[in-house]
Image (cartoon, grey):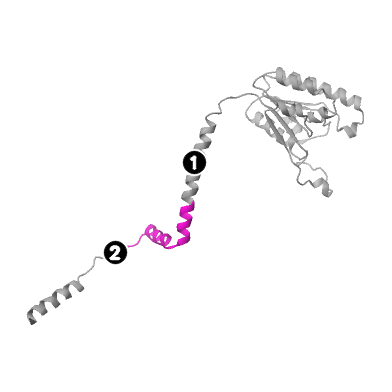
Amino acid sequence: MHTRFYHILRAMAKCAYRPVSPLPPATEKSTLTLQNASTPGNATMSEDTERHAMKMQKKKAARDKIMATKTDEQGLIIVHTGKGKGKSSAAFGMIFRCIAHDMKCAVVQFIKGGMSTGERDLIMRNFSDKCAFHTMGEGFTWETQDRERDIQMAQAAWEKAKELIRDPANKMVLLDEINIALRYDYIDINDVVSFLAEEKPHMTHVVLTGRNAKEELIEIADLVTEMELVKHPFRSGIKAQIGVEF
């Protein structure tokens, strides 16, 4: 009996003091993994990241499917209107894109007179071989105060515009502030609409700017943007400034 009890105790002692193999040293990666697993916030961030990735994958797949159907190209009729600032600025942005892509283009200014502007000076000084620039107006209507003269100048500008648009070498023609001339009936809106619909070359873009765009023009346009006025420094007594307005 005692002998049997002695052997049991000895076997238990051997099990209790059996050496255990040491754990491998913790690497930086395993340490970070343990820390992340032990932090509830990190687990939530990981779930959010996965959900975001899945959402973006579905969005990209849907977008790719839509884009696969957009295969046509054509010259656009583009209208920038509204009371907010940026109509001409955005249009000149597209003109400079054309210049950068070595595409011939042209500008006809219907209202703005001979005052120096950054865009005109830059184009005429450096890019006159790429962009024909015609300032046909003599200033805003409240400055000229001569309706008959304004009509003559606007109609001359429209004739120049038609000439430039008919030339297929010009990939974009900007008619700056033509909407003002149309608003005051210096030019016949029906003439403008019928010309753009019937004579504009298929691959030529025409951009028409100015507030109060006529409904007839909006109807035939491919792209219409209305600039909304939210705040303007003029209302706070700040005048037009170089680099912002001209």
Query: Is residue 32 found left or right of 186 in the rendered image?
Result: left
Q: Which kind of residue does numbered mark 2 sit on?
A: Leu
Can residue 199 be spotted in the picture?
no
> Which residue is at a point 51% across and 43% down the rendered structure image?
56
On the image, which quarter does residue 102 sit in? top right
Q: Residues within 10 Å of mark 2 (few under 14, many from 20)?
A: few
Nearer the camera: disc 1 or disc 2: 1
On the image, which quarter does residue 100 sit in? top right
The residue carrying mark 1 is 58
Residue 197 on image: x %, y %: 71, 20
Main SS of residues in magenta: helix
The region drawn magenta spans 24-48
Residue 49 on image: x %, y %: 48, 51
The residue carrying mark 2 is 23
Residue 8 on image: x %, y %: 13, 76
From the viewer's side, name the closer residue of 107 and 54: 54
Can residue 228 be spotted in the picture?
yes
